[in-house]
Image: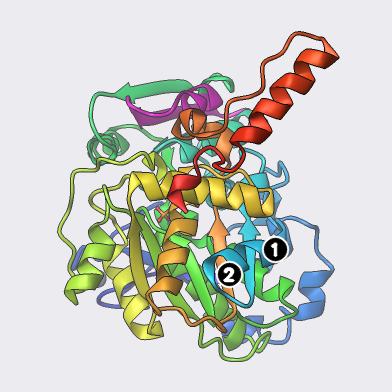
Amino acid sequence: MSFDRALRCRECGREYPLAPVFSCEFCFGPLEVAYDYDAMRGRVTRESIAAGPATLWRYADLLPCDPEYRVDIGTGFTPLQRADRLAAAVGLRTLWLKNDTVNPTWSFKDRVVSVAIARARQFGFEVIACASTGNLANAVCAHAARAGMDVFVFIPDDLEHGKVVGSAVYHPTLVMVDGTYDDVNRLCTEVSQSYPWAFVNINVRPYYAEGSRTLGFEVAEQLGWRAPEACVVPMASGSLFTKIHKGLTEFAALGLIDEPGTRMFGAQAEGCSPITTAHRAGTLNFVPQKPNTIARSLAIGNPADGYYALKTMAETEGGAEMATDEEIVDGIRLLAETEGIFAETAGGVTVACLRKLVASGAIAPDEETVAFITGAGLKTVEAVAGRVADPLRVPARTEVFAEALAERRGQAAAPAGAGGR
Ligand SMILES: *Cc1c(COP(=O)(O)O)cnc(C)c1O
Ligand SMILES: [Zn+2]
């Protein structure tokens, strides 16, 4: 059962009934789901969770929707993989990778959509929609297809081919907007006022956002019911970053783990770094930017949860980093070559920033760290296509192969692309 109780304004604390609304009528602050933790205590236990399915629905008691309305295509409970080779490369003793590339539409957005669509169906919506930087559209389209719902997704017109086709294949109404994500979001906010649609990240955003807590829950459970010392998380709106920490804190409040003490570190692309830039300036108030980066999934210049992400950084004594496009590509390659995970550009941002955080001493070599790899590389092949070694091209003749191999080995003293490291 669900223990959601109300929506509560994050600024003034006023409470509202659970409805498809997202901002406070009095102060315009964002609304967040409030739960009855007292009722949860003793009923939501390590055992009750462990008895659940190997998907994010094992945390159904902690989600703000009736699981009867769920659309389950196998999202969540993804591997937490120990990463000794990458740890050695970046200078850490203990590193884990939370591998969310293996979700049904190959990004963590399947988590937020799982919760949003269940809640939207519970509210009686028949149409689902979103404003997306690509991955969210993929997840919304797939879940809507499974549920047999009508779907409208709005994306900027400069997205990677893989993300456009990765939505179109589910046969939604796909709307490409001439502008940035921030333009798309503005359009959708207006559209949501005239159409009776559940925009997962607008009018049902309070429920959507809660889905990201499952990443915090899973990491704690998979570490054997304890929290890591540091987390490195990619940031677009900043929501995922804040909700991972919220998940760890809630587990402690329920007595499932000890007080976390986890330091939260955010990762952005240099070409869209409003949150990291504000952190460096020592302020909680970011200045919006016009994005220009290959990390399209993180290209939000006016991040809705930027302020709260900066607060979480300050409260946890964490920090933030940014990576250039060059460093992002090197990060993708380093992750693939050391750990066998092919991530999209957001994963490159995470790995590049992880490396810089350790190099600068922000994360100490002995701090047990979890890096969140939130999307898969086949969606953004164009980012690395020109940056991997050429294949040996040979006719089907052994002696030509032997010659080509000898020649390649002669060049092997300087492997292709070694410049970045
Ligand atoms: C959307 C997205 C993020 C960040 O999400 P926010 O909650 O908006 O900060 C991170 N990684 C990938 C791959 C994404 O698609
Ligand atoms: Zn308020």
Q: Which residue is mark 2?
A: 370
Mark 2: which secondary structure? Answer: strand
In the rendered structure, which segment of residues is drawn in magenta? 146-167
In the displayed structure image, the side of residue 11 where residue 359 appears, left or right: right
- Mark 1 touches mark 2? (CB < 8 Å): yes
Q: Is residue 25 left or right of residue 159?
A: left
Residue 42 at x, y percent in the picture:
72, 87
User: Residue 77, relative to residue 197: is it above or below?
Assistant: below
Residue nearest the viewer, comparing 78 with 320: 320
Query: At 73% across and 55% down in the image, what residue appears?
Result: 55
The quarter holding residue 175 reads top left
Sequence-wise, the earlier of marks 1 and 2 is 1
- Which quadrant is home to the N terminus? bottom right
Badge 2 local density, few (<14 within 10 Å), some, or many (20+)?
many
Residue 335 highlighted magenta (yes or no):
no
Residue 241 is at least partly visible in this image: yes
Q: Picture coordinates of residue 180 (x, y %)?
A: 25, 35
Residue at image coords 18%, 68%: 27
Give the labeled residue for mark 1: 80
Residue depicted at x 57% and y 40%? 415
Q: Amino acid at mark 1?
A: Leu
Q: Secondary structure at mark 1?
A: strand
